[in-house]
Image (cartoon, coloured by chain):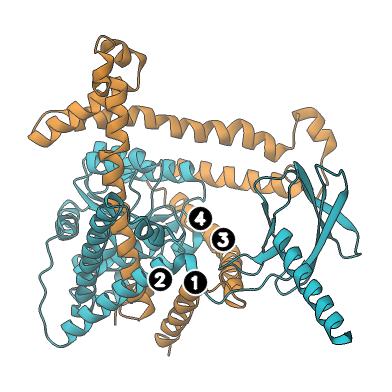
């Protein structure tokens, strides 16, 4: 009999536990850095009050209102710390005030599953780039289409040398943490080398001190590499101002006063792009621009002789250096484009035939 | 070693930053913030280099009386005035060497630095920005000159979009029956902006993103070295 009673109470206890879990339960937010918990409830009430115990054990209301949606995400928590929650509501039929408590602990995850598609895509593109680099190493030759904006560099340097005028190079208005600025500096390296070879003059006004420091080193190295260290002038790369329109005013002044034979606007540009390009156009200089800012490209296309559009900016270093390894990586970009096109077409087909999981996978849902 | 050390740093930082984007667990989720803080510290020191460069290049130009040397002098004087005023009376809530300068504030209505910022710097900056309107007009004029099939297409599209964005455009096509509402200029304009324009912009953005992946990989693996000053 005692055993039966024991089993009976055990069953009751388990049922109560399950019943409690069905009413008020917490889930760790998936794929996060352990800073959020999802609190769920399933009660028949018009409104509820959700409380959290503070460090002193006092209940603090964190949500009070409509029963639906029966879920609340508590964020800004500390990982691996236990939190106490209490759900309070009034039973609509009996008028009893009921309350349920629970304890939960947010956990840091080792992988963000929402970014699985992105990781796979990056891995595939990276592997393709590595494959093509290896193929080049094995001696395979790839065709690279002409990029007229980069071919114009020789023309610009030649013209500047003939006219005895300087070349203006603007590396954009973003700092070194922007990939466009890095790409711009690699182009500057090649341009400075040509300028040194032709004994021409280069002007590089910079908006940010970090960019100026890097540009100075790059130009100096290029002159050294060209065997003309004495031709390098330290004041050819200089800082103007951190202010966007002050920088534009300064460059416009240089263009009007110095009348450079060629202007290069390569890097990240915003509202100042057209002011720079139009002023340069009015001075009659050969202008080459390059940016990945889609909104600024039309301005450059209209006002400049040559424009590097989007990825051409990032391909410039490989294209100019003609380094087989770098050229191989360009083929990897092309594979990436093919992959994107294929995925978009497959996505459209999947949506038409009702396979919404395909889109959801890439959206990271 | 001088060449290899930056390459090793670039490799480690590149891998860590990429990994931390996918791993929300400590210490990876804290690394991006840490690296960004380091970057800000370096930027703080680099600002001084910028100021030194500004002084050196301007003084050189003034000393050698290069063309338009008085502009460089005006730039230097402006810099020094703002620096001194900022140091003496501070800016907004921050006090300077002479405190908040309440007497000066009573006279000017604000701190001297803020007064010049509001009444000299901001109007000058707005003036430069306003030039954009004129440059847009001149650039648009050149773009819309009919020289080829493409520029013709561009001009027609531009006219539809410009008219569609004005009440005049709506009025022009108000007689078109509701069943053909797609041909109303505002709707046509919205269609052009929403579909062909967005598609073209996204194509550029996707290709640029691929370019960034490729460039990053080249830098992480040390294939691309010209950003260090030399590719050898």
Label 4 or label 1, whichever lies nearer to me, is 1
The kind of secondary structure element at disc 4 is helix
Which chain's residue wears label 4? B
Disc on the earlier residue, 1 or 3? 1
According to the picture, the residue beneath numbered tag 1 turns out to be B22
- Residue A185 on image: x %, y %: 35, 64
Which residue corresponds to mark 2? Answer: A119
Which chain contains the residue that carries disc 2? A
Measured Cα–Cα span from mark 4 to mark 3 = 11 Å
- As drawn, B30 above or below B159: below
Task: State the SS at label 3.
Answer: helix
**Residue farthest along the left direction in this orientation:** B148
Residue lying farthest to the bottom in this orientation: B1
Mark 1 — on which chain does it sit?
A: B
Q: In the visual, does B142 lie left or right of B6? A: left
Residue wearing tag 4:
B54
Q: Circle 3 is placed at which residue position?
A: B47
- N-term mark: 4 or 3: 3
Same subunit: marks 4 and 3: yes
Give the number of the mark in front: 2 or 3. Answer: 2
Q: In the displayed structure, does residue A90 sit left or right of residue B196?
A: right
**Labels 2 & 1 near each other (Cβ < 8 A):** yes
Q: Nearer the viewer, mark 1 or mark 3?
A: 1
- Check chain identity for marks 2 and 4: say if they share one: no
């Amino acid at each position: 009999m005692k055993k039966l009673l024991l089993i009976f109470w055990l069953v009751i206890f388990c049922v109560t536990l399950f019943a409690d879990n069905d009413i008020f339960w917490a889930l760790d937010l998936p794929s996060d850095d352990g800073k959020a918990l999802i609190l769920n409830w399933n009660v028949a009430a018009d409104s509820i009050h959700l409380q959290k115990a503070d460090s002193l054990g006092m209940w603090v209301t964190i949500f009070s209102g409509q029963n639906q949606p029966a879920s609340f995400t508590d964020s800004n928590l500390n990982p691996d710390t236990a939190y106490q929650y209490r759900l309070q509501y009034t039973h609509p039929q009996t008028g009893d005030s009921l309350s349920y408590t629970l304890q939960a602990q947010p956990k840091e995850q080792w992988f963000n599953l929402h970014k699985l598609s992105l990781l796979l895509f990056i891995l595939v593109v990276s592997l393709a780039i590595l494959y093509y680099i290896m193929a080049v190493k094995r001696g395979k030759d790839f065709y690279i289409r002409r990029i007229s904006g980069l071919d114009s560099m020789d023309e610009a340097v030649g013209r500047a040398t003939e006219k005895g005028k300087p070349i203006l190079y603007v590396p954009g208005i973003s700092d070194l943490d922007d990939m466009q600025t890095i790409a711009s500096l690699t182009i500057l390296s090649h341009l400075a080398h040509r300028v040194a070879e032709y004994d021409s003059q280069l002007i590089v006004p910079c908006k940010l001190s970090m960019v100026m420091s890097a540009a100075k080193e790059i130009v100096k190295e290029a002159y050294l590499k060209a065997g003309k260290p004495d031709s390098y002038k330290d004041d050819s790369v200089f800082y103007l101002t951190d202010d966007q329109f002050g920088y534009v005013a300064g460059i416009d002044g240089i263009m009007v006063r110095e009348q450079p034979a060629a202007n290069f606007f390569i890097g990240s540009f915003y509202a100042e792009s057209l002011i720079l390009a139009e002023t340069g156009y009015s001075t009659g200089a050969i202008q080459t621009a390059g940016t990945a800012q889609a909104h600024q490209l039309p301005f450059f296309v209209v006002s400049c002789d040559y424009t590097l559009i989007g990825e051409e900016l990032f391909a410039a270093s490989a294209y100019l250096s003609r380094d087989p390894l770098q050229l191989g990586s360009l083929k990897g970009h092309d594979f990436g484009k093919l992959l994107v096109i294929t995925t978009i077409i497959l996505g459209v087909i999947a949506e038409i035939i009702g396979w919404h999981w395909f889109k959801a996978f890439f959206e990271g849902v | 070693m001088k060449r290899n050390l930056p390459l090793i740093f670039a490799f480690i930082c590149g891998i860590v930053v990429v990994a931390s984007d996918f791993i929300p667990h400590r210490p990876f989720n804290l690394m991006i913030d840490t690296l960004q803080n380091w970057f800000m510290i370096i930027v703080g020191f680099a600002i001084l280099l910028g100021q030194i460069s500004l002084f050196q290049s301007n003084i050189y130009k003034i000393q050698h009386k290069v063309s338009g040397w008085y502009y460089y002098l005006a730039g230097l004087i402006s810099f020094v005035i703002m620096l001194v005023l900022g140091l003496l009376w501070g800016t907004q809530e921050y006090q300077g060497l002479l405190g908040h300068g309440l007497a000066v504030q009573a006279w000017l209505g604000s701190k001297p630095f803020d007064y010049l910022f509001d009444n000299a710097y901001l109007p000058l900056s707005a003036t430069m920005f306003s030039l954009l309107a004129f440059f847009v007009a001149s650039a648009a004029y050149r773009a819309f000159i009919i020289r080829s099939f493409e520029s013709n297409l561009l001009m027609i599209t531009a006219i539809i979009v410009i008219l569609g964005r004005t009440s005049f455009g709506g009025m022009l096509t108000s007689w078109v029956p509701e069943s053909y509402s797609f041909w109303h200029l505002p709707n046509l304009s919205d269609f052009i902006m929403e579909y062909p324009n967005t598609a073209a912009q996204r194509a550029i953005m996707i290709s640029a993103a691929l370019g960034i992946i490729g460039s990053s990989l080249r830098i992480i693996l040390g294939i691309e070295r010209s950003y260090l000053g030399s590719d050898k």
